[in-house]
Amino acid sequence: MDEINSAVAEELVSFLNDVPTPFHAVHEAKSLLKAAGYEQISERSDWHLTKGGKYFFTCNHSTIIAFAIGKLYEPGNGFMIVGAHTDSPCPKLKPISKVNKAGFLEVGVQTYGGGLWHTWFDRDLTVAGRVMLKHGNGERNSFFHELVRIGRVILRIPTLAIHLNRTVNEGFKLNTQTHLAPILATAVKDEFNKLTGAKMENLSIEVNASKTSAKSPSNAHHNLLLQLLAEELKCEPEEICDFELQLCDTQPSLIGGGL
């Protein structure tokens, strides 16, 4: 690989390691575009475009559209479009992800896109995405979102050892509902209480007392997961209103080969 191609490959790998989700990809792309002289505009505002101008806007913080107007451009002239994905096939956390099964805390996921789902087995996994937070005293709340990626291994989708499943090499048929079940922890009550703390227990009491719906964060998701997110975001677990999270590999992208 020559020096120029090597630099391009290294830049791509660096970008991929920074963008585990579409939200992170758009956030990083915005920084790159601004550094290249692009101006951010909004779909909600009138546009005042000029020849030679470079602009971009975002949708849902997961889609980004950028365009440059030629200095000699005239209305009616042609233009070129290049499209790409900010997303990729992955397991996403369900709106209600709390699953307790056989003494384990599992995280319910649903498949997004057409993926090779067996490649997610036996990997060191974590979660990333965006979290909706609430600040305020209940009367004057403000809501905003933060990007998050838990920077350590918290999940694994295990497979059986060969001596427990002798026929696996004869043709394994994946059931995404039963086989794609990431394990968060063992359901040992003492350890669970140590990790979640009294605040989450009090929150659970308040939720039950107020008859909050099943989609309330503490009812819909494991308290341990909420605590991990809160630690990463440096907030209180009860400030988490909702989230859009997906599984991602903790193994960074690398350039392979012997040359």
Image (tube, grey):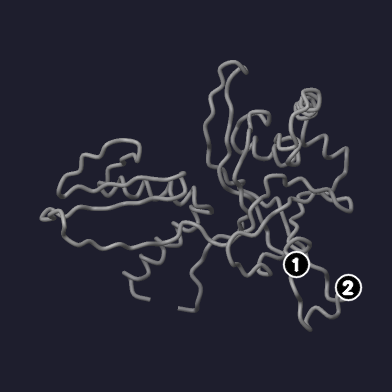
Nearer-the-camera pick, 5 or 114: 114
Q: Mark number for residue 134?
A: none
Percent across and percent down for residue 133 are 58, 32
Q: Which residue is mark 1?
A: 175
Quarter-of-image position of residue 209 = top right
Percent across and percent down for residue 136 are 58, 20
Left/right placement of residue 159 relative to residue 20 reads right
- Amino acid on which the number 1 mark rests in the picture: Asn
Percent across and percent down for residue 48 are 21, 39
Q: Nearer the viewer, mark 2 or mark 1?
A: 1
Question: Residue at image x 86%, y 52%?
Answer: 101
Left/right placement of residue 162 relative to residue 242 reads right
Task: Classify the position of the C terminus by image quarter.
Answer: bottom left
Percent across and percent down for residue 52 are 16, 50
Q: Residues within 10 Å of mark 1 (few under 14, many from 20)?
A: few
Q: Which residue is mark 2?
A: 164
Above or below, comparing residue 116 to residue 150 in the picture:
below
Left/right placement of residue 72 relative to residue 205 reads left
Question: Residue at image x 35%, y 45%?
Answer: 57
- Amino acid on which the number 2 mark rests in the picture: Leu
Question: Residue at image x 57%, y 24%?
Answer: 135
Give the secondary structure at mark 2. Answer: helix
- Which of the two labelled residues, at mark 2 and mark 1, occupies the earlier sequence position? 2
Q: CA distance from mark 2 to mark 1?
A: 18 Å
Q: Residue furthest bottom?
A: 170
Give the secondary structure at mark 1. Answer: loop
Question: Residue at image x 69%, y 54%?
Answer: 109
